[in-house]
Amino acid sequence: MIRSITQPKPEEELNRLLSDFNRIFIIGCGTCATLTRTGGLEQVAAMKERLSQAGKMVTGQTVVPVACDNLTLEMMKEYDAGIQQAAALLVMSCAFGVQTLARQIPKNVIPALDTLFIGKETGAGKFQEICTQCGTCVIGETGGICPVTSCHKGLVNGPCGGTDKGKCEIDKNKDCAWTLIYNRLKALDRLDAMRKLFGPRNYLGEPKPGKFEIKAEA
């Protein structure tokens, strides 16, 4: 399952963002932020307690099923009284959820979390980045293993001189991405693919903000 991985903002930053608002409505997310334990029921309840102790008035709280869903506004209607009383909404979800709510509700919207990356759960409470959504995918040449996210240095030509017995010089407990790629290509009888030299990556990518449109068939 693919998730947006988030972490709580530093307390000092959050206090600054909320400094002008005394009445707060808290919104958590029942999917990604619940899975990462940054915006589920327990975290929303803890945030309410924290704000109350800081002298803020919490006008209401909820955890919506999917904060980034356009149907969220419909689900929020039962909390309209608390939302209208609030000076700001504190959203405990990924940035996509924050922006979705900001488009739908004419209130100050404050993010409680920082969005780190798109990743997958690899164990209980452990998440690994699997894609930076760079728009220049090379995994067709690397046996389905992404060197940009799997390699600490993001090398598209490897391995570097720091690999040691299949481990990364930056993290001795981490497998070298390019050793994994080599072993994968060898098993597939495609080692010749290692001879291909990739040119410098275009880190500018497409003009921002990104857009994609499916063209209608003639």
Image (tube, rainbow, N blue to C red):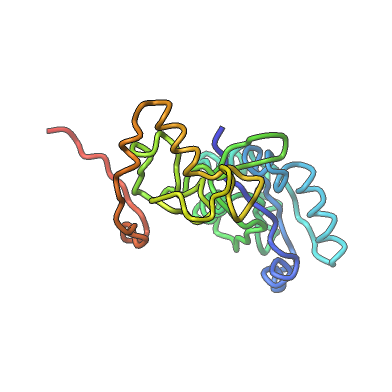
Q: Residue at x 36, y 44 (%)?
A: 137
Q: Position of residue 15 (x, y in %)?
A: 74, 69
Q: Classify the position of the N terminus by image quarter.
A: top right
Q: Position of residue 131 (x, y in %)?
A: 47, 44
The percent coordinates of residue 75 (x first, y second) are: 60, 39
Q: Foreground residue, 109 or 176?
A: 176
In the rendered image, the quadrant that contains the C terminus is top left
Asked whether, in this view, residue 137 is left or right of residue 9, the answer is: left
Name the residue furthest right.
Answer: 53
Question: Observer-nearest residue: 195 or 60?
Answer: 195
Residue at position x 72%, y 35% from top?
Answer: 124
In this image, 106 relative to 55: left or right?
left
User: 185 or 15, which is in the foreground?
Assistant: 185
Q: Position of residue 122 (x, y in %)?
A: 63, 35
Q: Residue furthest left?
A: 218
Please tell me whether residue 19 is drawn above or below residue 50 in the rendered image.
below
Q: Residue at x 35, y 49 (%)?
A: 135
Specify whether 182 is left or right of 21.
Answer: left
Q: Nearer the viewer, residue 63 or 3?
A: 3
Q: In terms of image quadrants, where is residue 41? A: top right
Q: Is residue 138 above or below residue 17?
A: above
The part of the image, by quadrant, that contains residue 8 is bottom right
Q: Which residue is drawn at the image coordinates 34% and 48% (left, top)?
A: 136
Q: How many marks?
A: 0
